[in-house]
Amino acid sequence: MARIEISSLAKVYPGPKPVNALDHVSLDVAEGEFIALLGPSGCGKSTLLNILAGFESKTEGEVRFDGQPVGKAGPDRGVVFQEAALFPWLTVFDNVTFGPRMQGVAKPVYEKIAHDMLALVGLRDFAHAYPSQLSGGMRQRVGIARVLVMKPRALLMDEPFGALDAQTRLSMQELLLEVWQRLKTTVVFVTHDIDEAVLLADRVCIMSARPARIARQINIDLPRPRSIDDLTTPAFIRYKAEIMQVMRDAHPAKAIAAE
Amino acid sequence: MTHGAHEAVTTSARPSAYGLAAFRGGLHLRKLAAGAVLPLLVILLWQLAGTGGSLFGGVLPTPDRVASAWYTWAFGNRGMGMNPYSGSWFDSVVFSTTRVLQGFAVALLVGIPTGIMIGWNRLVAGAVDPALQMLRPIPITAWLPFAIAVFGISSIGAVFLIALGVFYPVVINTTQGARHVERNLVRAAQMMGASRLDILLRVVIPASLPSIFTGVRIGLGTGWTAVIVAEMIAVKSGLGYVLWDAYYLGRMDVVIADMATIGIMGLLSDQLILMIERYALSWRLVNSNR
């Protein structure tokens, strides 16, 4: 499990008109904590995630992962992308075992873990299908399974359910709750969906408009294990109303679009 | 866990696959028949327009004359009578096809790795791409005197020209493919601990395959063009040589039979590459069958 410490992180994209994406963001994530970064599209929350993942460089500040400055991308930080980003020329099974194969894990070992993880995400019968044969939700299950087989110390999820229809999104959120309940991995989850943030996270960090800062952090003290039935409880609605108010203040024009 | 239960799955449509295949087979035949109407009509009109076996005052032979010349060219006795082409059709086809295959092999062996490196590595792109872009506007026909001067009247000169003609489309399309690999696929591979070499071999190359095949198919057309041009001037055998030679001897029936032969060979080789492509990119076809 991991501890993420971000202090005074800034990111400027250089160019004729430099873009300030992150404005000295500070954030600590405890071991096993599920944190949601909430904000409208283009507010810089994905930039934050990409720096954490090691895909992008920072301009200023410090990002530590288990006490070490984060370097290039690696299997200790498993990333789940919005459009799954599976290799279309590999079967589901070969996609899921890609990580262990790259790391030189012995075949009998990774085959067993891969089968376990495919079962966990409900894709046991689709090991030999190609991604193009799967629905969007199923592809994202593969995207989650291929990260879980590496036993990462943190899961970084970049609007993983943003492209799915409402029904599928609910079932994916429930799946993620189940998986997280079992594995208790540290999760940083980027989303623009308030319901999703409150349902999943221990703590919701609301990002301001660009250049992004963390406008407000709200602890979600809903009891666990949670399920989609929580979406309609009074406590849930109170959190939602509070967050909407903060978002309205942080993004005067965008608050409604974000909902 | 039952999460997969309420999501649509394309593979569940499998039971009807046989019926679908049969339907497609019927469609294929009908398409073929529809495609044959126009050529047959042209041949018929061409036949009817001729008098005494030719059109335009003896310049253009009618289809029946072409067919009979073709038959003699293919199955006639060698060295008998006044017909220098009698029985030599298969040899000519083999000569030309072999040269195309040789030039093709050289072009793919050099062009695909070069394109991958240009597309993937900025240093290589900076060093190689400008030179390529400068040489590319020179048409392969302009290389003919160069090829003859360097290789003489030989098969190697023809193979050189074919290789050159195939090389450009292959290298350009491969470069495009390697340059535009989806960024998140590369990031996903990095995140899973893949080395730079792993990313090149397991992500960039498979992701470039569709573009590579596009280049190969375009290159095949250039390859047949190049072999005919080269054989007309730089070699003394093959379909291109016969084409020009028959023209000089006033054998327009052989000229037209030769043209038809080239067309058929081009079509067959393109179909062959399509079959290989379908096999190599079967992961993508699964998608288009939806």
Image: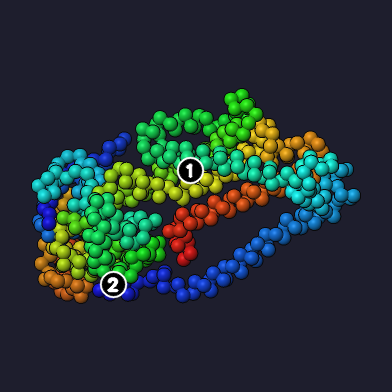
Q: Amino acid at mark 1?
A: Asn
In the picture, the disc for residue B173 is 1
Q: Can residue B92 be seen at all in this image of the molecule?
A: yes
Tag 2 and tag 1, C-beta contact below 8 Å:
no
Image position of A112 (left or right of B34): left
Q: Which residue is mark 2?
A: B3
The residue marked by circle 2 belongs to what chain? B
The picture quadrant where one finds residue A175 is: bottom left
Residue B282: percent from the left, percent from the top? 45, 58
Image position of B128 (left or right of B49): left
Residue B88: percent from the left, percent from the top? 73, 44
Residue at screen point 51% across, 45% down:
B215
Q: Amino acid at mark 2?
A: His
What element does badge 2 sit on? loop
Q: Can residue A258 be seen at all in this image of the molecule?
A: no
Q: CA distance from mark 2 to mark 1?
A: 42 Å
What element does badge 1 sit on? helix
Residue A235: percent from the left, percent from the top? 13, 71
Question: Considering depth in this image, is B251 or A223 the residue closer to the camera?
Answer: B251
Residue at screen point 15% across, 67% down:
A181
In the picture, the disc for residue A244 is none
Residue at screen point 90% across, 49% down:
B52
